[in-house]
Image (tube, rainbow, N blue to C red):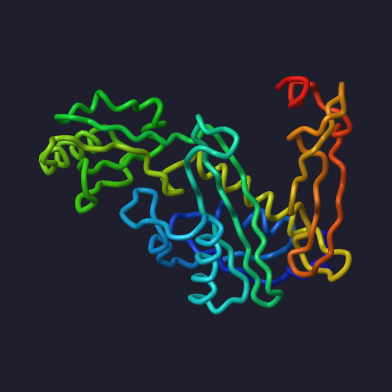
């Protein structure tokens, strides 16, 4: 529902960010539910950084909710929005690194937290060791440089770190400086994964924001709260040949973020899946 009767139409929400995420989030929320999103710069780095100088404590979802609450506390608004990214292998695909972006809305008036995520396998995220100032050893093409920024620091420690590098001359200067500061003359060069320095990541955040906006547009038929959507995917779709239950999704359970209303819908094509997914036909 995107009409004038949507409960978020005409309301304001705060986006907690210091990394220029407002253009990635605000248009989707405005278009789908009429929610005006304003940015408020808070120290989201206090909850963890990609470089590891401030370790993230808690799950991705926990940190995302905490970011949203930082914005709520700083702005005085009752609805907060935040995003949190994570890089690494995902369950079921342990050999390929992925970018997982979560965008969440926290509404203290309704008492709900609603999040949607997007996965992408193409966001540059290199991390390489460079010895004796050998900049030519850095895989610049794989890093998406210069459009995607880089970070340089000595092999150990975080006291000296040059971030947001988009120029080759600056990269050479940073590698030289960090090499001289490193006892082993080894430095680490990695992608700067902050949103303002990673165009590919920005696209993933925007896509996750679109997912969230579309979910918020759907109201619960029982209590009228925004955010009716998938809360669980149920495995067990039968093999097309022998009928054995497989790990493939058979149905999706939809639910409300506020009340206990749920509903289950069978996934299209789940009445019979290819035998190659069957533990009996293809053990």
- Towards the viewer: 268 or 238: 238
Q: Is residue 24 left or right of residue 186?
A: right
Residue 247: image location, x then y, percent: 73, 35
Location of residue 193 with respect to 53 vertically, above or below: above
Identify the residue at horizontal 34%, vertical 48% (top origin).
51
Identify the residue at horizontal 51%, vertical 66% (top origin).
66
- Towards the viewer: 96 or 27: 96
Quadrant assignment for the C terminus: top right
Q: How many marks?
A: 0
Quadrant assignment for the N terminus: bottom right
Residue 271: image location, x then y, percent: 89, 32
Residue 99: image location, x then y, percent: 52, 41
Residue 205: image location, x then y, percent: 56, 48
Location of residue 188 with respect to 131 vertically, above or below: below
Q: Is residue 24 left or right of residue 130?
A: right
Identify the residue at horizontal 48%, vertical 40% (top origin).
88
Toward which corner of the image does residue 182 lie, by quadrant?
A: top left
Identify the residue at horizontal 48%, vertical 60% (top origin).
58
- Towards the viewer: 253 or 39: 253
Toward which corner of the image does residue 193 lie, by quadrant?
A: top left
């Amino acid at each position: 529902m995107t009409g004038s009767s949507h409960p978020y139409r005409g309301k304001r929400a705060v986006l907690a960010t210091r990394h220029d995420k407002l253009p990635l989030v605000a248009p989707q929320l405005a278009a789908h539910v009429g929610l005006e999103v304003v940015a408020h710069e808070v120290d989201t780095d206090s909850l963890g950084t990609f470089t590891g100088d401030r370790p993230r404590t808690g799950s991705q979802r926990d940190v995302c909710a905490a970011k949203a609450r930082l914005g709520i506390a700083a702005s005085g608004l009752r609805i907060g929005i935040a995003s949190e990214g994570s890089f690494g292998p995902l369950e079921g695909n342990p050999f390929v690194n992925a970018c997982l972006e979560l965008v969440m809305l926290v509404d203290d008036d309704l008492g709900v937290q609603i999040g949607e995520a997007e996965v992408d396998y193409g966001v540059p995220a290199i991390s390489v060791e460079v010895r004796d100032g050998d900049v030519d050893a850095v895989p610049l093409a794989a890093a998406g440089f210069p459009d995607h920024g880089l970070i340089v620091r000595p092999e150990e420690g975080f006291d000296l770190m040059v971030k947001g590098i988009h120029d080759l001359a600056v990269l050479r200067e940073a590698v030289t400086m960090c090499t001289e500061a490193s006892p082993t003359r080894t430095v680490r060069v990695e992608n700067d994964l902050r949103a303002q320095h990673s165009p590919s990541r920005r696209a993933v955040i925007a896509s996750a924001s679109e997912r969230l906006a579309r979910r918020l547009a759907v109201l619960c038929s029982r209590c009228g709260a925004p955010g009716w959507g998938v809360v669980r995917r149920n495995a067990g779709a039968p093999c097309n040949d022998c009928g054995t239950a497989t790990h493939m999704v058979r149905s999706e359970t939809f639910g409300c973020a506020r009340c206990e209303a749920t509903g289950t819908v069978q996934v299209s094509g789940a009445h019979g899946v290819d035998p190659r997914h069957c533990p009996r036909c293809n053990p």
